[in-house]
Image: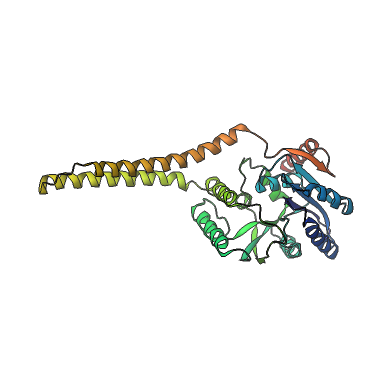
Amino acid sequence: MSVPISIVMPVFNAGKFLHKTVEAIDAQRRESGWDIELIMIDDGSRDDTYERVEELGEKYRYIKAIKLSRNFGHQAAVRTGLEFSDGDYVAILDDDLQDPPSLLPMFFEYLDNGYDVAYGERKKRKEHILKRLAYSSFYRILRGLSSIEIPLDSGDFCVMKRRVVEHMLTLPERNPFLRGMRAWVGFKQIAVSYERQARIDGVSAYTFAKLLQLGADGIFSFSKFPIRFITFLGLLGLGVALFYSLFLVVMFFTVGVDVRGFSTLALLISFFGSLNLICLGVIGEYIARIYDETLHRPHTVIEKTLNFESPEEHRTSRKRAHEVEKA
C-alpha cells in the first residue's frame, strides 16, 4: 500500500509486553508493504514503558513517541496522537493486541473503496460476563439518550481518512469521547464486525471508576436528555404533590380522617429533598463541563518526544496545513 499510514497507539504500563505488539505491527507492515509511522503516546506510565519505547525506536525507525507529563487518560492521549499524525490514513490501536494489527488491511480496503471511516464492531469480547453486560448496557443506553446515532458495541479501534481526523481535531472538548466525536463529524462510515481478543498480558487501565467517567463523558457530551428529564421529574413531582394534597383534603372532609402527622411530613420532605439533590447533581455536571471548557487548558502536557520536531513547531505546522486545506 503506497498511501502513508499513521498508527496511533496509547501505551500505559506496557513495558513487559510492548515488544510483542510492535512485532505484530511490523510483521503486518512487511506483509502489506505499508509506509507507516507508529505514534506511541506514553500516558504517564509508572513502569519502564517509555524506556522500552525508546529501545524499540532504535530498532524500528518508523516509531515516533510522545511522553506525557502525567496520566491524562486514554481519550486525551489518543487525541494527542491524532494531533501529531501525518498519514493520509490514520488507525487507532490499543497496546494489548485485543484489536489485532492483522485486521487493519481489511479495514483499509474500505477506505480504498470510498469510505471515510471503518470502525470495529465487537461481536464477542473475551472478558468477564459482568463486564460484557456492563459494556452492552452502556452502549444501548447511550444510543437511546444521544442526540446523534452512536454505533452499538464500537470502540476506538478504527481507521480514518485524514479529513475526518482534521475535523475531529477542531472539536475543543476538554473531556473528549472519541467514538462520539467520530460519529458526530459524519462522512461515510461503515462498521466492520470482529471478535475481540483477550489481552496479551497485564490488566486493563480502565478501572471501574474510569469506566464510569468514560460513560459520563459519552452521555453528558452527546445528550441533553438528563437535563430535560429534570423538567419531567419536576412536573411529575408537582403532580404527585397536588394529587396527594387533594386526596388528604377529600379524606379529611368526607371520612373525617385526621391526616396530620409526622410520618406524612417526613415522607414528603424525604421524597422532594432527594429529588432536588438528584436534579442539582445533573445540573452541576453540565455546569462543571462548561467550567472545564472556559479554562482553555491544553488536553495534555508533553514531557518529551522521540523522532518528532518540537511539539510547538508540529502543532503550528498542523494548524497551517489545516487552514490551507480549508482555504
Q: Position of residue 7 (x, y in %)?
A: 76, 54
The x and y percentages for residue 243 are 24, 47
The picture quadrant where one finds residue 316 is top right
Residue at coordinates 19% horizontally, 47% vertically from top-left? Answer: 247
Specify whether residue 101 is in view. yes
**Position in image of residue 15 (x %, y %):** 77, 53
Q: Residue at the spot x=56%, y=65% of the render?
A: 129
Count of residue discs = 0
Q: How is the image coloured?
A: rainbow
Given residues 170 and 215, the one toward you in this image is 215
Q: Please identify the residue farthest to the top as the structure is shown.
A: 295
User: Which one is nearer the viewer's eye here, 126 or 66?
Assistant: 126
Q: 124 or 53, which is in the foreground?
A: 53
From the top left corner, tell me how far across and down residue 274 is, in percent. Answer: 38, 43
Residue 208 versus residue 280 in the image, above or below? below
Tell whether 41 sits left or right of 129.
right
Q: Determine if residue 116 is in view.
A: no
Residue found at x 59% / y 32%: 294
| Residue 76, placed above or below residue 128 | above
Specify the quadrant that holds the N terminus.
bottom right
